[in-house]
Each structure stands twice: as C-alpha cells, then as structure tokens.
Image (spheres, rainbow, N blue to C red):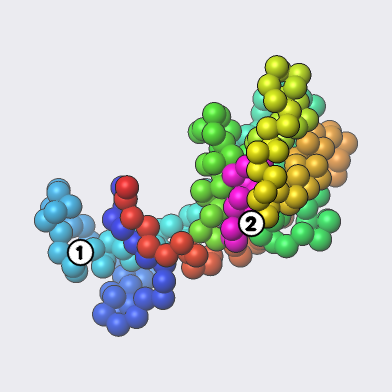
Amino acid sequence: MSCSRSRTLVTGPIAGFHRRMETEAISGHPMRTVTWTEMAEGTADDYVYLDGVYRRHAADHIVDNLLNMVRLLEGPKLGYQVDRARHSRQSATRALRNGEPVDMVVAALLHDIGDVLAPENHSALAADVIAPYVDEEITWVIRHHGVFQGYYYFHHLGMDGDARDRYRNSPYYDRCVDFCANYDQNCFDPDHDDLPLEDFRPMVAEVFSRPSRLGVETAD
C-alpha cells in the first residue's frame, strides 16, 4: 500500500528530492531502502523519497499495465462470437472512427477491464480507474454502462430492462444511452475491422499522463 499522495505540481524541496531520485535512477545508482518496518517510524525525508519512487514507477508502467488488463480479456468467447478483448477494441475503434474525443476512446477501450477482477461490479472498477484522468461525464457513463446495457437483455433474464430509467434525471443519461447503443451492445461482430490494441497505446498514454483531477489520494 502506498502512502497518501498528491498529483499536483511539486515544487521546492520535494521537487529537489524527485530530481535527485530521477538522476540516481538514470545513473544506475542503487535505489535506497528505508530502514523501518512500520510506517509510523518514517520521516518526512523518507516519505518524500518514497513518493517520488512510487510516482516514477507508476508513470513508467501504467500504460503497459492497462493494456495488459485488456489482454487478460483475450481467449474465451463465453458463447459470443468474439472474446471480450476484441469487444473492447471494437468499442474503442468505433468510438475513434465516430470522432469521439480521445478520453471517450480510451474509456471505451477500458470499459470492461473490471470483468477480470470484479465481475459483479466491473463498471465501477473501470470507472474508478479512469476517474482521475477524464471528466465527470465520461466517468459517470462508464460507471453506469452495465445497468444501461441491461436495456438490451435484462428482460430476458426476468430483470427490469428499464432499470436505467432510475437515472433519467441525470445530465449524463443520454450520453450513457448513446455509449451503450453505439460502442457496447453492437461490438460483438467478428467481421468488424477493429484496430489492434497497440494502436491505442499513444491515446492511453496521453490520458494517463495527466495530473490527477482528484487531487490527494487518502486511505479510507
């Protein structure tokens, strides 16, 4: 577990520690390790250093990690004509070709990554992943796309196909309806010329290189 951290612009002594850490990494000097085993024993110097190490590590690996989450969806088709990774690429491809902003394209690519770790609340997991980097509307769309997608099949399973209507007063309701209609329910076509995953790397990097719009992360 990382310590609390802020992604706002860092200046002053903290920035100096970050520059020193980066210089050591580039020069090949070994990374230092704290001497304690309980966080209560850490000093300000320790936590400035650890924060810098964590930030560099996260920045260096987040894009690969996210693309690998999509790759984890490859393989089983689970009765559909495409696997969930191709479904995700198809969703992002359609969004891109339809002129959507890069934020929505990336959100479309990642909207089902929660299937791997949180099958009962996959929409919420994906929304929390993108929330620090995209606006409230896109986060809301991804958070609620599961229930909105239910419009197309819940009634076949004895559930309420109009469950999405509980959110009709949301300013993002129509956007979520549009997302599911154009970038989700129709993205199971084995003949669609969806783009390869690596084509989306620059877009994922653009979105996830931004400062967090959520500010400081604190433990609950």
User: Against 163, is 167 above or below?
Assistant: below
Residue 173: tell me if it is visible. Answer: yes
Which residue is drawn at the image coordinates 20% and 64% (left, top)?
A: 46
**How would you classify the magenta stretch by its main secondary structure?**
helix
Q: Nearer the viewer, mark 1 or mark 2?
A: 2
Residue 26 picture quarter: bottom left
Q: Position of residue 183 (x, y in %)?
A: 77, 45
Q: Position of residue 48 (x, y in %)?
A: 26, 67
> Label 1: which residue?
46
Instruction: Determine which residue is flagged by label 2.
Output: 137
SS type, badge 1? helix
Residue type for callout 1: Asp
- From the viewer's side, name the closer residue of 6 and 75: 6
- Picture quadrant of residue 86: top right
Tag 2: amino acid? Glu
Q: Residue 148 vs residue 30: left or right?
A: right
In this view, 23 is above or below 42: below
Residue stretch in magenta: 134-145
Residue 58 shown in magenta: no
